[in-house]
């Protein structure tokens, strides 16, 4: 892991991966392990669970310092823009076709 930070409704993680590693397996491990830890330590009033799915974007090594800076400044960044606005911008920037019904849902 190169960087991690989050706000109340999501986290950003920057990970260096090898081509033989499975992103879906890694995210399953992260989500299940962190959910178990949060619930075992009773950090929420209700049972905690991540939403289904995730967003993943790749960056070249030359972009790593900027991505780390971006991740470390989440609180400031989200004073100006919601996660949903940010996520849709990423999808458009990376030219990912999507249906808004199937992306991030606001926490209940």
Image (cartoon, rainbow, N blue to C red):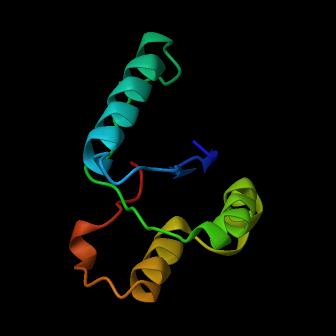
Where's residue 47, x and y in %?
35, 24
- Identity of the residue drawn at 39% across and 80% down: 91
Quadrant of the image containing the N terminus? top right
Where's residue 87, x and y in %?
46, 72
Q: Is residue 46 visible?
A: no
Q: Nearer the viewer, residue 17 or 12?
A: 17
User: In the displayed image of the protein, which residue is found farthest to the top?
Assistant: 40
Image height of 4 relative to 19, above or below: above
Q: Nearer the viewer, residue 93 or 18?
A: 18
- Identity of the residue drawn at 58% across and 46% down: 8
Quarter of the image holding residue 81? bottom right
Q: Is residue 63 left or right of residue 24?
A: right
Quarter of the image holding residue 65? bottom right
Where's residue 55, x and y in %?
37, 62
Q: Is residue 68 visible?
A: yes
Image height of 41 relative to 51, above or below: above
Label tally: 0
- Identity of the residue drawn at 72% across and 56% down: 75
Q: Is residue 44 left or right of residue 73?
A: left
Where's residue 11, x and y in %?
53, 49
Image height of 105 relative to 51, above or below: below
- Identity of the residue drawn at 27% across and 77% down: 100
Q: Nearer the viewer, residue 68 or 42?
A: 68
């Amino acid at each position: 892991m190169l960087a991690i930070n989050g706000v109340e409704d999501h986290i950003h993680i920057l990970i260096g991966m090898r081509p033989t590693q499975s992103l879906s397996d890694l995210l399953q491990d992260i989500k299940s392990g962190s959910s178990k830890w949060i619930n075992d330590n009773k950090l929420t009033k209700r049972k905690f669970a991540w939403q289904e799915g995730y967003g993943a974007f790749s960056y070249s090594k030359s972009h790593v310092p900027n991505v780390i800076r971006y991740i470390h400044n989440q609180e400031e960044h989200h004073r100006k823009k919601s996660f949903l606005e940010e996520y849709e911008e990423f999808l458009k920037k990376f030219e990912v076709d999507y249906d808004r019904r199937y992306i991030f849902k606001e926490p209940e």
